[in-house]
Image (cartoon, helix red, strand yellow):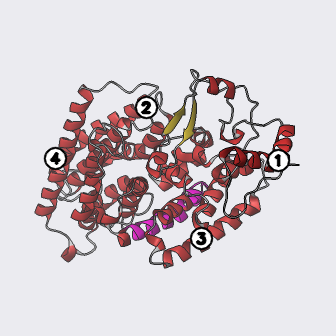
């Protein structure tokens, strides 16, 4: 026993202080030596598998914008030149951390929510339902294919609010039941989670602050996908799409700034525009503030992504279509002659619309001349096939609308419509060999070509006996298959 005097404010020399600390830690040091980890690093900080991943190890980034890409990662590279790092790699593999967030959801249900990312870009609900019903294998192929999507942004928000969590969960359960129909364990929980998602989502929408969050719009979009995956509930899908449209309009064009918001907006633009077409109404996206919003989404260096100059320009043209269709339908239907727009002005607007389409196509061809062709390994952001088939569809519709109110031009305009419909069918065959998702997208649009080719004969009939306006039955025979409902009251 040794006594050291540290009284009266005296702290002793450095040597005596060291001896005091050594004596105080003697029992603790003896206990640590028994564990076999004396002097070693915190093993929880090691990579999950340091032996197998000796060269590199990727870990997802936590920032929202990089998480949205689905490809952002940092690379772990051990410093093998350091003696300390070499000794570190000889330690045994540490115990895995417990699962959390989406990984826990994936382990529970048996499918990762990011595996259905390709389904989030479905453009047309009722035609997609028809495809899924007749070709069940197509959806299984899409479920197994990850694609850049707003789901990568939603992944980092899982666990933060009930409505988004429940929406993600019920969509994951539905997708699991599609690829494994024999599994009945989720029958009851699927409905329970859907009801919970609806109830919590309604509360969020009623909250002035909460409904401004992109999470709310994301949950609505996911619930519309859930309805679509029922295969027979396309009308319920449409109700969610209309709800998303109202929320977007309430928020206003200046509120879509973050990458999450922009991805959600672009995924919903075509479905919303299509619903305005089906309901014979003009779409508010054609208004100048919304057109400016779309222009702000452009990434200059991108050539064929959804945010490229070509994609955004075509979107700005597309959203002008519903008003033209509505006005032509009013003329053909003759339900209220007093409300029909001036035919001269309507024809002028249609000609300008076609000029915009032709200018877009000229720009597209110019870019294609200096861009390598799309191969089997093209990135998921390359949507050149989707852009071209959308152009074909819009041009066919513009030709039919013009000839519907000016029958003396039918022969010329119908030749153009048939030619583009034939190109559209050929593109379907080409794309099917390259990209499964692009093929599914084209299948949703190919109905425009089919309806046009099927009605070209009656469209040309009795031209010498009809007025300047096409007969209503001809227009109905063409437009009904495209929109899936009666075009006139």
Give SS at disc 2: helix
Question: Which label number is shown at residue 431?
Answer: 2
Residue that appears at 29% across and 55% down: 294
**Badges 3 and 1: C-beta atoms under 8 Å apart?**
no
Q: Position of residue 459 (x, y in %)?
A: 29, 49
Q: Nearer the viewer, residue 17 or 438?
A: 17
Most common secondary structure along the magenta stretch: helix
Give SS at disc 4: helix
Q: Position of residue 223 (x, y in %)?
A: 56, 61
Q: Nearer the viewer, mark 3 or mark 4?
A: 3
In magenta segment, residue 109: no
Q: Position of residue 330 (x, y in %)?
A: 26, 67
Q: Nearer the viewer, residue 191 or 462?
A: 191
Residues in magenta, as a range:
224-248
Give the spatial CA distance, label 2 vs label 3: 38 Å
Question: Which label number is shown at residue 355?
Answer: 4
């Amino acid at each position: 026993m040794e006594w050291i005097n540290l009284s009266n404010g005296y702290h002793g020399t450095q040597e005596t202080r060291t001896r005091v600390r050594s004596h105080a830690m003697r029992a603790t040091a003896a206990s640590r030596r028994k564990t076999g980890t004396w002097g070693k690093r915190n093993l929880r900080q090691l990579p999950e598998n340091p032996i197998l991943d000796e060269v590199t190890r990727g870990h997802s980034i936590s920032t929202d914008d990089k998480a949205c890409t689905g490809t952002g990662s940092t690379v772990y590279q051990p410093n093998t030149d350091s003696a300390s790092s070499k000794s570190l790699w000889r330690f045994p593999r540490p115990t895995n951390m417990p699962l959390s967030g989406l990984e826990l959801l994936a382990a529970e249900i048996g499918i990762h929510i990011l595996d259905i990312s390709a389904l989030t870009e479905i453009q047309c609900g009722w035609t997609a339902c028809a495809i899924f019903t007749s070709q069940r294998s197509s959806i299984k192929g899409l479920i197994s294919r990850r694609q850049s999507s707003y789901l990568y942004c939603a992944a980092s928000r899982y666990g933060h609010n009930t409505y988004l969590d429940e929406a993600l969960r019920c969509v994951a359960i539905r997708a699991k039941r599609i690829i494994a129909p024999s599994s009945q364990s989720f029958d009851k929980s699927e409905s329970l989670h859907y009801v919970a998602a609806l109830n919590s989502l309604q509360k969020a929408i009623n909250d002035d602050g909460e409904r401004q969050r992109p999470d709310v719009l994301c949950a609505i979009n996911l619930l519309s996908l859930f309805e679509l995956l029922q295969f027979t509930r396309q009308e319920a899908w449409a109700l969610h799409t209309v709800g998303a449209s109202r929320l977007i309009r309430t928020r206003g064009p200046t509120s879509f700034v973050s990458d999450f918001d922009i991805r959600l907006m672009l995924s919903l633009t075509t479905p919303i525009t299509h619903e305005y077409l089906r309901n014979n109404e003009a779409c508010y996206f054609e208004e100048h503030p919304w057109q400016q919003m779309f222009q702000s989404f452009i990434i200059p260096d991108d050539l064929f992504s959804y945010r490229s100059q070509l994609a955004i320009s075509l979107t700005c043209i597309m959203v002008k279509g519903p008003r033209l269709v509505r006005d032509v339908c009013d003329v053909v239907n003759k339900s209220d002659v007093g409300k029909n727009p001036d035919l001269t002005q309507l024809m002028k607007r249609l000609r300008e619309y076609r000029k915009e389409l032709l200018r877009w196509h000229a720009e597209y061809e110019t870019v294609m001349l200096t861009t390598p062709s799309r191969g089997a390994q093209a990135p998921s952001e390359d949507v050149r096939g989707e852009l071209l088939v959308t152009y074909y569809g819009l041009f066919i519709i513009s030709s039919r609308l013009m000839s519907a109110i000016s029958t003396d031009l039918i022969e010329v305009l119908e030749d153009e419509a048939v030619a583009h419909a034939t190109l559209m069918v050929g593109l379907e065959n080409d794309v099917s060999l390259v990209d499964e998702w692009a093929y599914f997208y084209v299948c949703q649009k190919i109905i425009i070509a089919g309806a046009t080719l099927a009605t070209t004969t009656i469209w040309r009939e009795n031209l010498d006996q009809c007025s300047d306006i096409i007969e209503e039955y001809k227009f109905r025979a063409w437009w009904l298959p495209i929109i899936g409902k009666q075009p006139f009251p």
